[in-house]
Structures are given as C-alpha cells and as structure tokens.
Image (cartoon, rainbow, N blue to C red):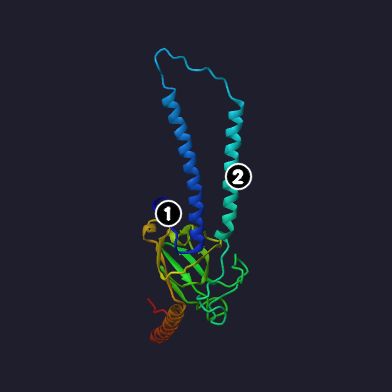
C-alpha cells in the first residue's frame, strides 16, 4: 500500500499526513467498490433481452433524498476527521528525552513568530531558497545583526529527538521545500516567511528536492536532512563555526595584503 500513500516514517507530522490520507483512501475505496458493484450488477441484471420491456420509473424521492443525505454525511465525516488530524500536523510536539540538551546548551530557542511545541523550545533553522541551492542558517550568530551564524548548503544536519522548526524564505524566486518523509511541501516565497517543523527519531539521511519549477537549474536543487545524535550535532555545529571564523580571518588577511600592494582605493593612471 506504500506505493499509493504519501511517504512517511521520518517525523510525526508526516505520519499524521499519511494516516489521514489512508483513512480517506479506505473510505473512498469502500464507496468506489459499492458504487461500481451496484452499477455492474444493474448492467448485468437489467441487460437488454429480446421482447422484454424495462420498467418505466419516474424518480424515487426516498432514494434521491437518501443518496444526497448520505453523500453529505460522508463529507462531514471526512471534514471532521481532517480537522481533528490537522492540529497534530501543524503543531509541533516537544523534543524527546534524548533530544539536544533541553535548555543549557544554547541551541534550543524560543520563538514568538511561529507555532511552537507546548514547552516552547525548538531548534530554529532558517531555510533560504535560491537559484539553485538551499542554504540553512543555524542559531548562534556572533554579531547582533545576525551575521556570523553557522550555515550549511544542500545538506541540513539536525539532532535526533529534537523538535526542529524551519523558517522558509527565498532570496529570488518561488521555491518549494520538500523532504517527503518529513512532512508536506512548504513554499519559499520572496518577502514571506513560511514555517514548518519536524522531529526525527531515527538517525539517517532523508532526501528531497525543490518541488517548484524555479528555473533552468531546478532539477539540480536537491536537499537532504541528516539526523545525527545530539552530541554529534553539537560537534558539527562547532566545526562549522570554526570554519567561518577561519575563513573570516583569511579574508581579512587577504584584504590587508591587497591594500598594501597598490594602496587602498588607488587606481593607476591610464
Ligand atoms: Cu527551486
């Protein structure tokens, strides 16, 4: 049945989407079989026979009221089920007991601008879509204006058992963030912030790609989320910070060198 249903297994919201899909699929299957069965039976039972004159029926109020009310009841049931499931799809749950240290290590952040789990703590990552690459900006900026934050491209590394909330934005055109096993698509629209979340219990790599045709390089705009134990995540994040610090130092040195060579801002006469 997995072929007919959405991918799931990576995060609770994706599992809820898949189970809602299944409930609707099974109800629809029962209706489909009943309707097609009745149609087939009527075709066979009342097929044309020589000399037979079919019954001439003009309407059946009870039957017509019956299938109108029946269809309405089915729709109401589906709508109620959907709204019941919707909250567990949209609202994040708390991090698990084995998640990245609950309070104290500086990677869990409260936030006022998105849906939060009951305890208010999530690891907040900004997902920036651009032609043709996904960038992930982590908390931990070294400067107040947000500069110096650790970041990564294409592969997002996250701690297991930790509620991760994503702030999805775009720096050029509309892209769509989608890792099927971790939940539904989220559009990255210039000038807007869209939010989603996931919580991965099994370490591993969850693959996806941009799901919105965004230009010539769209097919190459792949993404994956690598879930690792929290300790490994901390080490990875520290290493990213170190790389940025080193690159900044090297850039400063190179600038100083260039400045000495021809004198800063000077241009030779033609
Ligand atoms: Cu794209």
- Compared to residue 85, the image places residue 63 above or below, namely above
Q: Is residue 179 visible?
A: no
Residue 269 location (% of width, % of height): 39, 78
Give the quarter of the image for residue 7. Answer: bottom left
Precedes in sequence: disc 2 or disc 1: 2
Is disc 1 surrounded by few (<14), some (14 to 19) or many (20+) residues within 10 Å? some
**Mark drawn on residue 213:** 1
Residue at figure coordinates x 43%, y 85% from the top left: 249
Give how far across and how far down residue 256 sits, in percent.
42, 86
Q: Secondary structure at mark 1?
A: loop
Q: Report whether 155 appears left or right of 146.
A: left
Q: Position of residue 2 (x, y in %)?
A: 40, 54
Kindly state the secondary structure of the residue where label 2 is placed. Answer: helix
Classed neighbour count for the residue bearing mark 2: other residues with Cα under 10 Å, few (<14), some (14–19), many (≥20):
few
Quadrant location of the C terminus?
A: bottom left
Distance, label 2 to label 1, CA atoms, is 35 Å
As drawn, 261 above or below 222: below
- Checking the image for residue 76, the label placed there is 2
């Amino acid at each position: 049945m997995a072929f007919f249903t959405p991918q799931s297994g990576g995060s609770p919201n994706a599992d809820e989407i898949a189970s809602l899909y299944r409930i609707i699929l099974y109800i629809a299957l029962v209706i489909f079989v009943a309707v097609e069965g009745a149609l087939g039976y009527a075709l066979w039972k009342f097929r044309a026979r020589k000399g037979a004159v079919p019954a001439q029926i003009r309407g059946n109020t009870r039957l017509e009221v019956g299938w109108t009310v029946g269809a309405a009841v089915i729709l109401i049931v589906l709508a109620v089920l959907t709204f019941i499931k919707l909250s567990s799809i949209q609202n994040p749950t708390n991090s698990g007991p084995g998640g990245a240290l609950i309070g104290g290590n500086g990677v869990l952040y409260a936030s006022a601008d998105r849906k939060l789990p009951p305890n208010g703590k999530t690891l907040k990552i900004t997902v920036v879509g651009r032609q043709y690459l996904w960038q992930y900006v982590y908390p931990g900026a070294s400067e107040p204006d947000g500069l110096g934050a650790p970041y990564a491209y294409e592969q997002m590394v996250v701690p297991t058992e930790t509620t991760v909330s994503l702030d999805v934005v775009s720096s050029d055109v509309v892209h769509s963030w989608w890792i099927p096993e971790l939940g539904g698509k989220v559009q990255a629209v210039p000038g807007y912030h869209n939010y989603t979340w996931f919580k991965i219990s099994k370490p591993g790599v969850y693959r996806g790609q941009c799901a919105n045709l965004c230009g010539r390089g769209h097919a190459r705009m792949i993404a994956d989320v690598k879930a690792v134990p929290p300790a490994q995540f901390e080490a990875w994040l520290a290493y990213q910070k170190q790389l940025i610090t080193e690159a900044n130092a090297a850039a400063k040195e190179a600038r100083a060198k260039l400045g000495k060579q021809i004198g800063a801002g000077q241009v030779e006469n033609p």
